[in-house]
Image (tube, rainbow, N blue to C red):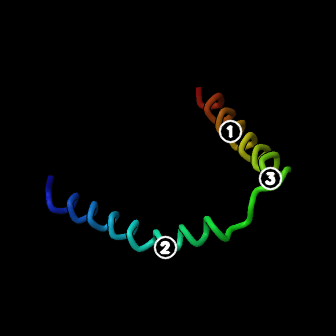
Amino acid sequence: MDWMKILAAAGVVMMLFFMWPAYKHWSQNGPKAEKGDWQAVVLPLAAIVGFVVLLIMMVR
């Protein structure tokens, strides 16, 4: 490994170390999912997937 990869890995580890307390706070005090939340997420995701498939079919 060259020194850039080692430096990048050290940066990622430091970022994870410093972000861990914020993650714990957000996961404990964040809003809880309710009944219709997943349905509200599935529709835009399905639209994006459909759009990407349409673009792929247009290129072929």
Circle number at residue 27: none
**Is label 1 or label 3 in front?**
3
Decide which of tag 1 and tag 3 comes sooner along the chain. Answer: 3
Tell me the quarter of the picture where residue 43 sits: top right
Q: Position of residue 44 (x, y in %)?
A: 76, 47
18 displayed left or right of 57: left
At x 68% / y 38%, what residue is drawn? 49
Name the amino acid, label 2.
Answer: Pro
Residue at the image point whose x is 59% and y is 31% from the top: 59
The residue at 46%/71% (across/down) is: 19
Q: Closer to the N terminus: mark 2 or mark 3? A: 2
Q: CA distance from mark 1 to mark 3?
A: 19 Å
Q: How far apart in space, not on screen, are marks 1 and 2 (Cα)?
A: 34 Å
Left or right? Give the position of 17 relative to 42: left
Viewer-proximal residue, 43 or 28? Answer: 28
* Crowd rating for badge 3 (residues with CA inside 10 Å; few <14, some 14–19, many 20+): few
Label whose residue precedes the other's in the sequence (1 or 2): 2
Q: Nearer the viewer, residue 36 or 48?
A: 36
Q: Which residue is mark 1?
A: 49
Whether 44 is drawn above or below 4: the answer is: above
Which residue is identified by label 2? 21
Looking at the image, residue 49 sits to the left or right of residue 24; the answer is right
Q: Residue at the far top: name it.
A: 60
Mark-to-mark CA distance, 2 and 3:
26 Å
Q: Amino acid at mark 1?
A: Val
- Label 3: which secondary element: helix
Front-most of residues 37 and 26: 26
**Which residue is label 3 attached to?**
37
Q: Identify whether 16 is placed above or below 35.
A: below
